[in-house]
Amino acid sequence: MEEKMRACDALVRVLVGEGVDVVFGIPGAHILPFFDALGRSSRIRVVLTRHEANAAYMARMYARATGKPGVCAGTSGPGSVNFVPGIAEAFVEQLPVILITGQVATGIIGMNADQEGTGEPGTPDQVALYRSMTRASSLVVRADAVVRKAREAFRLALGEPCAPVHLCIPSDIQCQEVVYEAMEPSGYRVTSFDLVDQDRVEAAAERLSRARRPALIIGHRAVFPNASSELEGLVEQCGIPFAATVVAKGLVSERHPMSLGVLHLFGHRLPERYLREADCVVAVGESFQENACNYYERELIPAEGVIHVDSCHEQIGKIYPVALAVPGSIRSTLRALTQALSRRGYRSPVAPEEIARLKSGTQHFSEPDAGSDAVPIKPQRFLAELARALPEGGAVAADIGMNFFWTLRYFEAAQGSYFGTWAFQPMGVAAGGAVGLSLARPGKPVVCICGDGAMQMNGMELMTAVQYSLPVTWAVFDDSRLNMVYLAQGLSYSERYVASEIRNPDFAAWGRAAGALGIRVERPEQIAPALAEALGCGGPCILDVAIDPDELPPLKPRSLLMARRTGLDICDSKIASKAFRKVLDER
């Protein structure tokens, strides 16, 4: 049935048809028609953020947690430019985020209009800006093309692998009348990806069935579409030991008896030790980013290469040689592989008891400092307490900074309880994006682990959580340093510390001033009651956690090689000596 309506209302109809129920952003003059249409819809909630970058971070987090595209919107010019960090992060993580920006009216393009971003002389080109970090970035200059371009945006964003898409729509185009005809998403895009190369699946099953020491590496493209149930089914059916890379941490519970932990330069020791002896390794949706493969360690992979299951063909064989490429839909391929192994009666010869024995020989979520009563607080102690306190359905969002390494290593994640990032590494990604995770999991507590630098950068979204009464806790690791930078300067710059020490506010008082709960945590015995109060308050909270600024992250010999990628060596310094001792003490 055809209906006449404004183009902005038709755009909202497309969003509703795609199941969009939240749009994150900040209105402005040239996107107001669209926001007005959103406000008149009973199906979509508009969340006013405090900065556009955080709107994109929220949309990214919402997409990952719900399995649906995240949508963010803002005005032209400076508003449109501010989304860049979040859209770039979604692009690197291959998540479907739709960015809708306004533009000056078509009749005044090129006439020095306020906030013009068309690329005309003297103006930035906001459409061109996003072409390097989206699958498509388009200026829509005809009202009758708005619906078509909106549907195209979802078609492109949800292709495998997923990617962000940007639509820029001038304000007068948003207001023009169009004819809208409803259409199910299946009428204009593929809604189910079930691409399976059965011959290659059978070949992979045959190779695995001969393995005496198999291993599974779970990568970030198993996150969206979420393959948790398929991965768990494969592990349960066949008993294959598995390690996760950083973004995939918690896709299958780290408490599972066959979990090896996190494969990362600052992760657990067990995955790399086990992988060096594995005779058959299946990598699922993994790009082998430098930290995930122990700084490109060749010995992690059998001589003949990996069985690489992936939806992104360009990543297969890029870093490590491939024994067998299995391109296709990750979820469907995993189901087919589990069935093929089941028909062969395959069960891994590696028993849970052996994995338990191997874990007992390493510091697998069990470093002595996890129970330390030292003051200032050891971050290991806080994260061990958090893992015990987090209720079922709760989630942790890990920011980038030294806090990320500790969370990666010492927070033992139940299935679906961890949301991190790594490759692009935008500081503030979780401090700004945790609200999106909370809206994706209504009523469930979310804890953002962030550093004091990230909180000062993007912690203004505390006010967003206050405005919408969301149960988000920001656990701020307060050490008055940008500690990743501080460590690098100590190791490679002879302890010349430049712009890496930071003056902090009273974060707990900040929380209370904003209308949230604010708690200062200075001693280990205060951690448990503070977490109980924060997680039980039903609203936003800041935990200002005074951590030991001199505590080093978990280090391995190859961790120290990372300095050389910038042409630097480890210098003779006190912090370097401490780091080498840390490496020797690691198990």
Image (cartoon, rainbow, N blue to C red):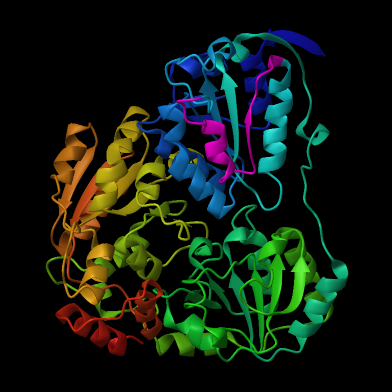
Q: Is residue 286 visible?
A: yes
Left or right: residue 372 versus residue 210 is: left
State the residue lying farthest toward the front: 121
Q: Residue at x 81, y 57 (%)?
A: 195
Q: Is residue 243 above or below residue 110?
A: below
Q: Give the residues in magenta.
A: 121-143
- Which is more toward the observer, 413 or 297? 297
Quadrant of the image containing the N terminus:
top right
Asked if the stretch drawn in magenta spans residue 138, the answer is yes
Residue 492 point in image, percent of width and height: 25, 75
- Which is more toward the observer, 407 or 490? 490
Left or right: residue 398 versus residue 282 is: left
Q: Is residue 138 above or below residue 88?
A: above
Residue 386 point in image, percent of width and height: 32, 60
Residue 81 point in image, percent of width and height: 44, 34
State the residue lying farthest toward the right: 199
Quadrant of the image containing the C terminus:
bottom left
Asked which quadrant contains residue 308, the reply is: bottom right
Residue 417 point in image, percent of width and height: 47, 56
Q: Residue at x 86, y 68 (%)?
A: 198
- Which is more toward the observer, 35 or 396? 35
Q: Is residue 419 visible?
A: no
Left or right: residue 419 versus residue 218 is: left
Total numbered labels placed on residues in the image: 0
Q: Residue at x 80, y 66 (%)?
A: 336
Left or right: residue 66 versus residue 154 is: left
Q: Residue at x 65, y 49 (%)?
A: 162
